[in-house]
Amino acid sequence: MSSDMWSYAPTAGHGPDADLTGYKVEAADGDIGKVDKHSNEVSNQYLVVDTGVWIFGKEVMLPASTVTAIDHEERKIIVARTKDQIKDAPEFDKDKHLGDPAYRDQLSGYYGGSGPGH
């Protein structure tokens, strides 16, 4: 399950060369911020979202599996989480996100299969 977590669903509308930087990100209950960076690497796909002022500039890393739709015309990404779920997520750690399995496990546990939206 956890490897699927880091891949986009086939129905999300993600292309392998898509540049999602700057896209607006919308939770189930409203706008949460913009994509600061992302990865298109197979089985390691994610978004880093700058949440802006509503939670004081926190950045969060969302596994690709949380994305339900990408609207390239509107430059908007819909994720299957609420604002509160994203606000309470572990904060993005730019030093750990690539090579620290414990950090990935923490994110997998937070967003994992038994959580809302799965």
Image (cartoon, helix red, strand yellow):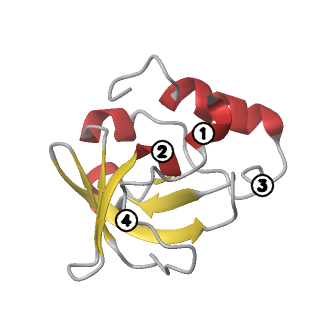
Residue type of the residue flagged with mark 2: Ser
Q: Which of marks 3 and 4 is nearer the N terminus?
A: 4
Residue extending furthest toward the left: 29
Q: Do the residues labelled 3 and 4 touch (CB within 8 Å)?
A: no
Q: Horizontal placement of 108 versus 77: left or right?
A: right
Q: Is mark 1 on a helix, strand or loop?
A: helix
> Which residue position holds label 4?
13
What's the CA distance linking mark 3 and mark 2? 17 Å
Q: Are marks 2 and 1 in contact (CB under 8 Å)?
A: yes
Q: Are marks 3 and 1 in contact (CB under 8 Å)?
A: no
Q: Is residue 24 above or below residue 55?
A: below
> Which residue position holds label 2?
65
Say which of 100 and 74 sits in front. Answer: 74
Q: Do the residues labelled 4 and 1 touch (CB within 8 Å)?
A: no
Residue type of the residue flagged with mark 3: Leu
Q: Earlier in the sequence, mark 3 or mark 1?
A: 1
> Which residue position holds label 1?
4
Q: Earlier in the sequence, mark 2 or mark 1?
A: 1
Q: Horizontal placement of 72 versus 46: left or right?
A: left
Say which residue appears at 41% left-offset and 33% top-offset: 88
What's the CA distance linking mark 3 and mark 1? 17 Å
Q: Horizontal placement of 89 versus 94: left or right?
A: left
Task: Specify whether residue 63 is in view.
Answer: no
Q: Which of marks 3 and 2 is nearer the N terminus?
A: 2
Task: Specify whether residue 27 is in view.
Answer: yes
> Which residue position holds label 3?
98
